Image (spheres, helix red, strand yellow):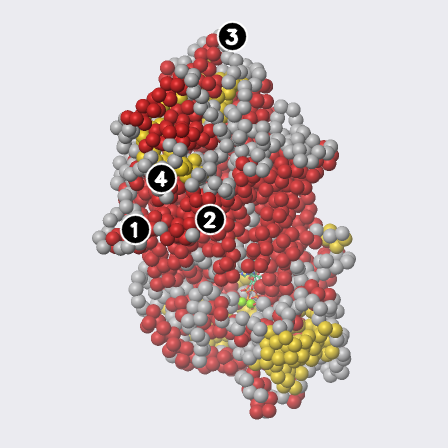
Amino acid sequence: MIRLEARQSVPGWLRLAATAGAGVAALVLVAIPIAAAGVGVLDAYALMAKGAFGSVFAASETLTRATPLILTGLAAAVAFRAKLWNIGGEGQLYAGALAAVAVGSGAISAPAAVMVPMVLVAGALAGALLMIGPALMKLRFGADEVVTTLLLNFVVLLFVQMMLEGPMKDPMGLGWPQSMPVTDEASLPRLMARTRLHAGLIIGLVLAVAVAILMRRTVWGFEIRAVGENAAAARYAGVPVTATMVRVALISGALAGLAGVGEVAGLKGYLTSDLSPGFGYAGIVVAMLAGLSPLGVIAAAIFIAGVFVGADSMSRATGVSNYLADLVVATSLLCVLVGGFLTRFRIRLGRG
Amino acid sequence: MTDRPPVLVLDGITKRFGPLVANDCIELTLAPGEIVALLGENGAGKTTLMNILFGHYTADAGRVRVADGAGGLSDLEPGSPGAALAAGIGMVHQHFTLAENLTGLENIVLGTEPVLRVWGGRAEARAKAARLMRESGLEVDLDARIDQLTVGERQRVEILKALYRDVRVLVLDEPTAVLTPQEAEGLFAVLRLLAAKGLAVVFISHKLGEVLAVSHRIAVLRAGRKVGELETAKADRRAIADLMVGREVAASRRSPLEPGAPVLELDGVDVAGKDARRSLHGASLLVRAREIVGIAGVSGNGQAALAALIAGLAAPDGGRMRLNGRPVARHDSRAFVEAGVARVPEDRHHDGVVGAMSVAENVAIEDIRAKGFQHWGFIDFAAIRSRAEAAIRDYDVRCPGPDAPARLLSGGNIQKLILARVLERDPRLILANQPTRGLDVGAQAEVHRRLLAARERGAGVVLISEDLDELFALSDRIVVIHAGRLAEAGPPEALDRGTVGLMMAGHGREDAA
Amino acid sequence: MEVLDILLTVNFWAASVRIATPMIFGVLGALVCERAGVLNLGIEGIFTAGAMAGWMAVWAGADLWTGVAVAAAAGGLFGLIHAILTVPLGLSQHVSGIGVTLLASSLSYFIYRTALPDVTTPPRIAPFRPVDIPVLSDLPFIGPVLFQQTPLTLLAFVLVGVVAFVLYRTPLGLAIRAVGDNPASVEAQGLSVHALRMGAVVAGSGLMAMGGAFLTMSAFDAFFFGMVNGRGWICIALTVFASWRPGKALLGALLFGAFDAFQVRLQTEVGAFLPSQVFLMLPYLLSIAALVAVARKADYPRAMLTPWFKGQR
Amino acid sequence: EAQKAKPIKVAAIYTVPVEQQWVSRIHKALKTAEARGDVTYTWSENTANTDYERVMREYAEAGMDLVVGEVFGVERAARNVAAEYPETAFLMGSSFGPAQPNFAVFDNWIHEPSYLTGIIAGMSTKSNVIGMVGGYAIPEVNRLMNAFMEGALSVNPDVKFLVTFINSWYDPPKAKEAAFAMIDKGADIMYAERFGVSDAAKERGVKAIGNVIDTSADYAGTILASALWHMEPTIDRAIKAVTEGTFEPADYGQYSFMAYGGGSFVADPALVSPEALEAAKAKEAEILGGLFRVNVNDAEPKSTM
Ligand SMILES: Nc1ncnc2c1ncn2[C@@H]1O[C@H](COP(=O)(O)OP(=O)(O)OP(=O)(O)O)[C@@H](O)[C@H]1O
Ligand SMILES: Nc1ncnc2c1ncn2[C@@H]1O[C@H](COP(=O)(O)OP(=O)(O)OP(=O)(O)O)[C@@H](O)[C@H]1O
Ligand SMILES: [Mg+2]
Ligand SMILES: [Mg+2]
């Protein structure tokens, strides 16, 4: 008989061993499709590592892809802490991006010192506003936020398309539905020449620390945790549950909105309706992998980004269908999930 | 009776949870027709032992043996409730194991029918359940969903569920904690009847009176060990308490005090709840400083509405409410806390603590926004910690430390934690809703002492309880609640239990007396 | 009046039923999983896997019903992965679900591309054809709307009844409903929490995959990348709308189908005056509105998202 | 620039899977070139725009001689990357012009054959209602739809159009439903921009107009005419230029015109009346002779009913 026993505490070596074990397991599993596609497995892994971290360029690409994931990951982590299941990061990201181009593509002209903060605030505000609806529908009518935020993703994306084909269309875009470019003043600075690294990464890192402090050290964080863990007891003890929920919704939406700002004002320069390949949804995975820890989000985001970038590059170098990249990400994700499990429980065989 | 061959033998049962030894080599033998009471303080290991017997837990050492048809004993498969049920063991769980989205009947038949059956069988089940209800006096609406039932009704379903199985051994883990005295009496009658027919019963309770009334034999656990076993006929309260606690438990005495200014006034208050249980009709109540007003009543008669009102969770729909002589401006928890109302919730696990947060955080939760505990929105952890350490020390909260998650605490210790949280603020009004439910004698005495001490320091107390002993011992005045209406019964000295019992059943003060 | 005209045509309702069919499978599947206490966000990928596997089986020579069975089995397999991760291992249902979606869709695409590396126009199969049922198909209005559909649509309707019957009329259904509300209730009555939950997730995932199979074997006759196109997510939403009841699930799916069929028709009616996106938003906005309307009565499986471990409190 | 030995190394980066009609034409042309031995060919499909720049760099770093793709979502970034790798030739589908030193562009300029299919449709419709189902309202789609509509109106001013966009490139069931809705409204000819539309037409016994690829074999008796796109003239010219070391950042768009064989018009004489066929052929001759220019209109087409 197999039994599980919760561990009282998790020793550090075990955490490391589990993570390493999960990595190895993922590699073994992924070897199956790689071999099936007729590629040398070890070569493939060498190429994968090289593609993710093997050069300054590779590492910069990994970090660039991690940047929005850190922010959407934080958005999910904050909300999930309060048991507010915000699945709408994708929509909030687009809302943030839309607001950023609305403000930052020439409608207002001011020096960078004014424009950059303005663009950031606009994006955060838009993301936050988008969360008000689901939060109020939840608190007022009990409408499940998983559903409302999920469905709003589709609505927002359509709204963005509508804007891009209508009032916000770039007249110089030759009819292509894209926004006017973000002006140089409103763009986030690049961090390194010949790479796509931009200041969004710094913003993400700073906010991760800020959110960590918020959750651990402040009254708001205390109340968020209390509401998330036991809303009834929190309400009984006088914690303003509704206000806390709204606050969390706003913070979460704002963080996801900032991810959109980074992508549009830091990376692409203008908004199209295919700005994000699902960063909002990936943020949920990042947050849960990190155990909802804000600092853990950074590591999880870099992990997910690195695996994707590396596997994608490997598939290209070996000529295997690049659907392999997603397959590797999915397998790694599930393996890491199981690895985390092994740290929490001891498996015992038999009785006694 | 004990000379009959045993139906069940627990043999050297040992169970550890990490470093804690919850059961230490426990032996227990049960003969058919015997009612054995299992006693012990909160956390002594009673539930753990029964959970092993029933297969919820797997013992680290030892075995459970049950009588087989051939007159011998055979080992019960460990860790399998299915096997226990098949061997004729039934269990009434301390914490309900009911699916709230199902009806009572559905909960009763769950698992008794072949899982893959496609048709029929429900009519016989209903008839059998109805018969059981008649015989036991435990009446519930079998077709009402569990979430529509009061705790007392749920407990009845939980018991019916076990009886329905036609068991040889019945384990009852604190079955009376939420039953009225009359209901408990009904249950005992059934137990005696079934025992006479050969059922073996393990009965767990913290109410010594019940134990003495119903059991044949008493086994006492302390800190995971069996410290004694005696014939009930030869036992007395004091000896049992000594065995359980290892010391004598002194009952608190209420000293006469002159009441002060009104702290809570309800004047013709209406609360329109979802159903009769959650409603109040023209309720008037006066609570003054230095007095304890006991609210007696059968559960589900509006206590929840009254408690919500005094806790600041609900606003009256009609009538007037005054706190400390002033009309209430804001009906919300925080405003009430700030107005000096201490609130002890009925369901301490659900409303009392945030289990995942630390003991220290749970002690500080009502004060977290107060000066001294935070500066500019940043928490002063040193202040919180020292407050928690004081609370742990002064209220004897047994826990690994202020940073341990509150969910690890036993019910009694959670209750002490809540008392430490609310009483340290020198409240003017205290709402104590079922404050000793499920607590052992020692913990009960501690809660009583705290409430009396607060009264002496000048607080007014509203004590809602279904335990008449407790009400008679602590209250300066008793008010009876029935069908959402409050009726003054008077000081306990001028009352007898029969009168209060009749008033609880809906009779007026005059015809009751 | 134009709007009314749309609502009065037989073809509109027939289209609503067609569009609703994959959703019916999907919502039923999600409902079975969630009733047992497991949220299955793998649905979008399981749809894809069902669409691919069923289609590919038929393309490789199997008959259509074998294809449906293969699709259901593929769904069940991914359901099993989700079940193992979330039930005995008790891992985050959100992450596992999204992981399964990623795994199922990328594996489907990878297999498809590896099997058909040089195809620029996807190969086609002979899909299910509408059946002609004597008498029923000839009924006015009802006939063309309900009984001139393909066998898979009829199967979806039948399955609504089957799922409802199992959930509400059999001991198995009783146990599933109980385990999603309070696993302890099931354990205390001697049933296996894990077996019930895993079984429900596997069965529910099989149902979801049949929704995917409908897309490639009935609604269309070839497999395309990304053709599931968010239908799985909508099912998750519709499940809440349906309050976890099969009958309401059918209603919700039909309502969504009607919104979508209506949207398409409205686009051709007044499309000249409004951006096309306004119409495309309609089904989502109406779904949110419908949810808000019923939310107060929504009856969550209380143990949803909560793993259960034996011997732990 | 130096001459290069055959086969040269070519990589393609597509933002959609190679089943997408548009991309399938590029893919096919490159596959043909590979089969001829002119090139070695690798490709990445379904590449998100976010990743596009990285993939371009990776291919350039890997020493590709020619990188083909579509940069509609990443116009500026793509030009910047290309400029950093002057040794590599880039030939990209784009709405904008070419860029120094190595960035050539192309597009599916088959508005001419689309116009001709419009003539066929305009003369063939009996109900005077034509349905059009598109994926997204982007210039590449709008342009062809508008040319088609203009062609139809040129021969039949009474014709009305129903237009729907389904907001997906590959949701054939959805496209099919949209087509059904139009047929219900009286459309007897469907302009099949997406997979699924011809299926609906065939099922309901109405006719369809093909676009980009020739699907007449799959829908016997349904496809009246098609406007086809051929990428071979474009791709082969680029390959030749790269091989010979004469690659210039030019606009290759013209090679999709009918005059270069990049676009063609086919009609099914069994389904189309001789008069209609004749009218279309006459217009085709005018176009090929430079006597007629089809308008380029990228605006979103709207229903006219
Ligand atoms: N699932 C568990 N995990 C860890 N420790 C446990 C668990 N269940 C019980 N314990 C430990 O076992 C001890 C005995 O608990 P148990 O529930 O048996 O007490 P009890 O005698 O039933 O108390 P009460 O009278 O309050 O019901 C507790 O102090 C607790 O520390
Ligand atoms: N999840 C858990 N992990 C570890 N220990 C636990 C857990 N849940 C409960 N316990 C332990 O089990 C013991 C018994 O828990 P239980 O909730 O039955 O309290 P109790 O002592 O019976 O209190 P009461 O019956 O008065 O409410 C507690 O002492 C607690 O330490
Ligand atoms: Mg106990
Ligand atoms: Mg207890």
| Labels 3, 2: front one | 2
Badge 1 and badge 2 both on one subunit: yes
Residue denoted by label 1: C144
Q: Is residue B8 left or right of residue B361?
A: left
Q: Residues within 10 Å of mark 3 (few under 14, many from 20)?
A: few
Task: Point out the image quarter for the C terminus of chain B.
Answer: bottom right
Give the residue at mark 2.
C283
Q: Is residue D44 visible?
A: yes
Q: Chain of mark 3?
A: D
Near mark 4 (Cα within 10 A), the count class, few <14, some 14-19 or many ≥20, is many
- Crowding around mark 1 (Cα neighbors within 10 Å: few <14, some 14 to 19, many 20+) is some
Number of the label disc, if any, that sits on residue D187: 4
The dot on residue D2 is: 3
A124 is higher (above) or lower (below) than B425 = above
Mark nearest the camera among 1 and 3 is 1
Q: Is residue B158 left or right of residue B222?
A: left
Marks 3 and 2 share the same chain:
no
Q: Looking at the image, in which quadrant does ligand 2 appear?
A: bottom right
- The single residue placed furthest to the top in the displayed view is D2
> Which is nearer the eye, B191 or B486?
B486
Of labels 1 and 2, earlier in sequence is: 1
Kindly identify the amino acid type of the residue bearing the numbered disc 3.
Ala
- Which residue corresponds to the image point at 51% horizontal and 68% vertical from the top-left? B94
Residue B98 at what x, y percent from top left?
Answer: 46, 66
Q: Chain of mark 1?
A: C
Residue at the location (57% across, 81% down)?
Answer: B482
Judged by depth in the image, the label closer to the viewer, 1 or 2, is 1
Which secondary structure, mark 2? helix
The residue tagged with tag 4: helix, strand or loop? loop
